[in-house]
Image: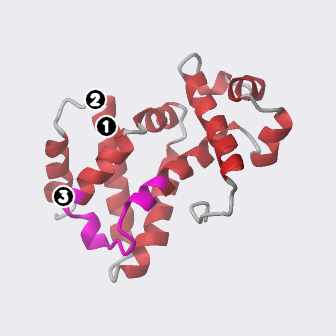
Amino acid sequence: MRKLINKKFTKRNRFTRQCIGEAILALTRQKDFESITISDIVKKAGVSRMTFYHYFHDKTDALNNYLHEVINGYREECPKNLTFAMLRKEDRIRHALCYFDRYAFLFITLEKARLYYLMIDAINEYAELYVAPSYPGSVYDLYYYAGALLNVFLYWEKNGKEETINDIVQILAHRVLHS
């Protein structure tokens, strides 16, 4: 489960892995995830099959790696000593929603491909690794928060973001997280 821990990747191999993830996402605009082959991916990414298999077992593993890169990007934008109390503040909720909105296509693609478990695992892992050490309460609080944030975000995106971001922040800050 500890995929969010930064491994020592060179800029080149990180770039290669990101190209593979982006190739998969681009291909999902043309066909279902299940129909995408490794040949499709390597052709789109401009890498060899050997390179693909050097980094990944399969296309789900590659997409999961791309998701973890996105989560690591979020972590890098957050204060170093982020606490659960800080996460529950409206400005932090807004930041999380805005950050993940930049990657909405990834999240929607994962859900459409029935890979929701990758998202919830990644967000739970983030909570365990980076929030739990400074949180005196129950880990159940963190899982509750992670699930609420992810589910509300996904529904908001799939619903065409009919509500304003401030409406969503209010829902999460006052109805869900303080009840």
Dot 3: element: helix
The residue located at (61%, 65%) in the rendering is 2
What type is the residue that disc 2 sits on?
Answer: Asn
Which numbered disc covers residue 159? 2
Residue sitting nearer the eye, 13 or 123: 13
Dot 1: element: helix
The residue located at (53%, 20%) in the rendering is 29
Residue 21: in magenta span = no
| Residue at mark 1 to residue at mark 3: CA–CA distance | 19 Å
In the depicted structure, whether residue 32 falls above or below residue 138: above
Could you tell which of marks 3 and 2 lies nearer the N-terminus?
3
What type is the residue that disc 1 sits on?
Answer: Tyr
Q: Residue 114 location in percent, x, y?
A: 53, 36
Which span is picked out in magenta? 73-91
What type is the residue that disc 3 sits on?
Answer: Glu
Q: Which residue is mark 3?
A: 90
Pair 3/2: label in front: 3
The residue located at (14%, 43%) in the rendering is 167
